[in-house]
Image (cartoon, helix red, strand yellow):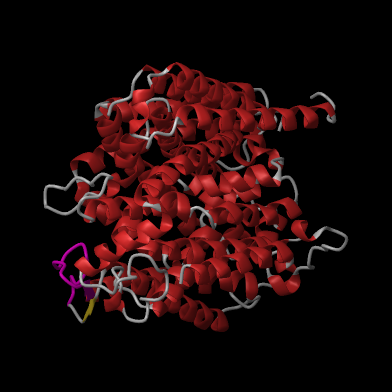
Amino acid sequence: MHPSEIDWVIMGVYFAFVLGIGFTLRRYMKTSTDYFLSGRSIPAWVAGLAFLSANLGAQEVIGMAASGAKYGMATSHFYWVGAIPAMVFLGVFMMPFYYGSQARSVPEYLKMRFDEKTRGLNAISFATMTVFSSGVSMYAMGLLLNLLLGWDFDTSVWLSAAIVLGYILLGGLTSAIYNEVLQFFLIVAGFAPLVFLGLKDLGGWQGLTERLTHVATSQGFASRAWSSTWSQMGHAASNPMGVEWFGVVMGLGFVLSFGYWCTDFLVVQRAMAAHSMSAARRVPLIAAVPKMLFPFLVIVPGMIAIASSTHMGASGFALPHKTDGTLNYDLSIPMMLSHYFPHGMLGLGLTALLASFMSGMAGNVTAFNTVWTYDIYQAYIHRGASDHHYLNMGRVATVFGIALSVAAAYVANHFNNIMDMLQLLFAFVNAPLFATFLLGMFWKRATGHGAFAGLLSGTAAAALHQALTLPRGSLVGIKGGWLAVLHLYPSEMAQNFWTAISAFTVCLTVTVGVSLVTRPRPEKELVGLVYSLTPRPSEAGRPWYARPAALGAAVLTVTLLLNFAFW
Amino acid sequence: MGLDIRTPLGVMFTILGLLLTGFGLLSDPAIYARSLGIHINLWWGLVLLVFGALMLGLGWRAGAHREPL
């Protein structure tokens, strides 16, 4: 069902507000700190919602629904084992160093704590990665808008690039953050009624789980395989993810999620923009509250779609097949939008998708322009210029960052394999990062040489692990096994988790080893950068909900209860 | 920073709410077969209106306590 006039009007209202916010903010952009860090003036709840939304790009939304269809309720491990504990850890333990050190970016923290080369490695790989991932999401958006709105690829890519360029150029990070807040409310407003209608159609949660029993048994799994989180995680073979509990807890929960949520500047930048230390620490904790309920908005639609597609005689709809005969899981949310929403609501649902596409892109662009300007341009190309010069550089970086993303989107459109290879490479670079930060913040003996050697060897370990293993049923090549096939994993996801675990372990070991034989920095230089040498911020006299530790404990308790409720 | 996000948020959701309720009142009831017979435009439009008004109210109240920039 293509949009009608009322749907276009609703989408138009959103675009008008997005650009309007940029124009209004333009006059506040006076210094580079205003532009890159919102002048460190954002209230905790605003930064918190932006923290959540910056990650909630369309790939996340579409991908989580697709995983919901493919793996069922166990997909919520990405939230209830992965994201939430990592966000609590960031707020309670790590934010004091990021914010307290007055670092303007994550790579800059690495320079303060370790040395120039560790910063350079991180800054360059991060900047390249953000540009490419924004290109990949633009490409995904182009395909989807073609299907939903009937736009061709060029129109989708150039129009969205122009709008994002417009509002970031005008209002910098504040523009991006404000639009992420709009996006958050639009996603809730657009998807909550969708889930309601889908569930009502299938006879509520009960009806959904009954149908999911058919999905599970028809594929040879136990009846609860699609509707439970943990009960089938004892063995990799008994759940559709092909992963056992240890891989989930260590690989996804500890290494990958902590690595992403605690070190990725895309999200950490939102917390750094908060107006005070206490607000900055609450940012990820505030974000965690809606985050733990998001599986119901983004994963359950996929479960509804697969239930509806599998059960014969359902009153619902069916997912279309891809050319290779498998179901096209990526279309779970788009199909539901056009099946359940009449004109009017359809416009709202499409606006929610568009908003998530654009703010996902904007998140990458704002992280890129900051790292480029502070950690590459100011550090290696042009030192000691005026603040005004760097502010202008940020604007220039916004333009060429978006131009590179557009180029990457076209590359992805024509040479899909190149993008797959790049993403694999980035996965290798990212996998060991959390070990470096963990040692940097909590072990004062860790040295710059140790960190640098650890990062390089962790990346090498990830590549080597991939080169020696293969997911069952895959061909030797991009999926792995290009040196030899020593081990077969039950699924690609299991292989990813173990790649991450190997990288983390090697990075940790090498960093410790090299640190012990190299000269540590004097302790007085590490005050404010390392846990044991930094005075704890006082929380006395605040209500519990304003104390990071108490708030974090509350968030973790509810998350634990959710794990049990859907066991 | 200068602009309180609740104001644009409130205005946008009020406009979206008005559009949806207005369209819901005028549209042919037959289109609601797909939403299981629920007049979703009207009802959800009202929810968005209430949310928009709430955000506007909060923005105004905060604005009244702050000195102009």
Q: Is residue A114 above or below residue A176?
A: below
Q: Which residues are magenta?
A: A469-484
Q: Main secondary structure of the magenta part?
A: loop
- Count of all numbered marks drawn on residues in the image: 0
A425 or A191: nearer the viewer: A191
Residue A541 counted in the magenta span? no
> At which x and y percent is residue A175?
58, 32
For the N terminus of chain A, the image quarter is: top left
* Side of A106 where A255 appears, left or right: left
Q: Is residue A61 visible?
A: no
> Looking at the picture, how far across and down is residue A485, in whole percent?
18, 78
Residue A482 covered by magenta stretch:
yes
In the figure, A224 relative to A128: above or below?
below
Residue A246 picture quarter: bottom left
Where does the image place residue B7, in percent across and percent down from the top left? 67, 27
Residue A130 visible somewhere in the drawing: yes
